[in-house]
Amino acid sequence: MKKKLPHAYSVRRFVLGAVSAAAMMTGSAALAQAQEPVQPVKPHKVTEPAKVELGKKLFFDPRLSRSGFISCNSCHNLSMGGADNIKTSIGDKWQKGPINSPTVLNSSLNLAQFWDGRAKDLREQAGGPIANPGEMAFSHDLAVDMLRSIPQYVAEFKSVFGNDKLTIGEVTAAIAAFEETLVTPHARFDQWLQGNTKAINAQELRGYQLFKNSGCVACHNGVNLGGSSFQKMGLIEPYKTDNPAEGRSAVTGNDAERFSFKVPTLRNVELTYPYFHDGAADTLSQAVDTMGRIQLGKNFSKTENADIVAFLKTLTGEQPKLVLPILPPSSDATKRPQPFD
Ligand code: HEC
Ligand code: HEC
């Protein structure tokens, strides 16, 4: 049986193709932008700076792990595109992680968090790794005890949340507020979408046209070029992997969603190698080749592949400019970490 692309794909492709061509002819940048299947990332406006600052400290604080050594930033390195650039992450006691670490950049724009979408938002997500034995291997109670033992944290939580409770809910809310600032606007491609025709070159534009016309946009669309749906990995041809992850069916129990994963964002994809949930594709060229074959039944030529890769590299946005937070010191009452036992 011939498998179908996501619903309404062919209609959209026709409409989008026709309209964007028309828009380019009239030279109307505003019209062109409105008709493209991809929209620019908007800069984030910080409304609660003190909460963001606290969240940043927590994101970088390794004392939220049992070993006292692993922070969120260990696996979502903000100096490296918000990922760890290894196939699957390394957790507590050098454990081999089960799955590739997705970037935290622009993750607030995704419909849900994790490859299988099991957390509905960043707040729900942030509680996971702290207590995950294969990641930070702590517990929510121990994390809260640690923070309560540090007077500067106690004062900061109080001033941000207006109470003396210091709960795990406040911890995850602060981390989420920080993560919401991690968007990457002003990519060259966004500048092009906004009417600067010189922002991308002829090869990159060819790559984008191919990306649209071959059907990549059926799944990789919207602001994040992904993150808006769950799709089968291996739609036309099965994907071969030793990785046991089942995808969406693990969450919904619906066998039809076996091997459906959240479509990853392609923003900053140049920085977030290796690719796929199992980290099996080392290079963008490999990832594009695999996608063409197994999702669309297309074998791209070398030039076509290079054009799409060139386009994907225009999606690297302005990286968050961070001042490294200075973390408050442990007090005499802070329980010492146990990295080796
Ligand atoms: C040991 C490595 C490791 C640590 C430490 C870690 N993460 Fe992750 N993170 C991962 C992996 C692996 C995934 C994907 C897991 C999955 O989908 O099943 C992930 C997923 C995520 C996602 C979902 C992104 C998306 O697009 O789906 C967010 C957000 C995130 N982590 C934030 C955090 C925060 C905040 C912390 C600290 C509290 C943290 N992570 C600590 C490895 C790590
Ligand atoms: C039917 C939906 C669909 C289509 C069509 C599709 N993709 Fe994907 N893409 C996905 C899914 C789902 C994943 C994640 C799969 C996984 O890791 O198991 C993915 C992953 C990727 C990744 C790796 C991203 C990362 O961070 O790991 C790249 C790059 C990519 N796609 C590019 C493309 C290109 C280029 C095309 C067109 C040739 C395309 N995709 C067509 C659904 C699709």
Image: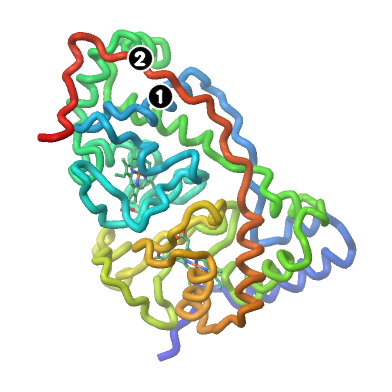
Mark 1 to mark 2 CA distance (whole Å): 9 Å
Within-10-Å neighbours for mark 1: few <14, some 14–19, many 20+: many
Q: Residue at x 41, y 42 (%)?
A: 76
Q: Is there CB contact under 8 Å for labels 1 and 2?
A: yes
Q: Is residue 148 left or right of residue 200?
A: left
Number of residues whose C-alpha sits closer than 10 Å to that of mark 2, classed few (under 14), some (14–19) or many (20 or more): few
At 51% from the left and 55% from the top, the residue drawn is 265
Q: Amino acid at mark 2?
A: Pro
What percent of the width, then of the height, locates residue 270? 55, 56
Q: Position of residue 263 (x, y in %)?
A: 46, 61
* Residue reaching furthest to the right: 26
Q: Is residue 234 above or below residue 199?
A: below
Rendered image coloring scheme: rainbow
**Residue at the image point whose x is 39% and y is 31% from the top:** 59
Which residue was labeled with disc 1? 57
Q: Quadrant of residue 306?
A: bottom right
On the image, the x and y values in percent for residue 280 come to 38, 66
Image spot of residue 194 (x, y percent): 76, 50
Identify the secondary structure beneath mark 2: loop
Mark 1 and mark 2 lie on one chain; the one further toward the N terminus is: 1
Q: Name above or below for residue 37 compared with residue 215.
A: above
Asked whether, in this view, residue 229 is left or right of residue 152, the answer is right
| Residue drawn at x 24%, y 66% as measured from the top left | 244
Q: Quadrant of the N terminus?
A: bottom left
Q: Which residue is mark 2?
A: 328
Q: Would the CB of label 1 be found within 8 Å of ligand 1? A: no
Q: Nearer the viewer, residue 54 or 82?
A: 82
Relative vertical location of residue 158 with respect to residue 221 in this rendering, above or below? above
Identify the disc placed on residue 309.
none
Amino acid beneath label 1: Lys
Q: Quadrant of the C terminus?
A: top left
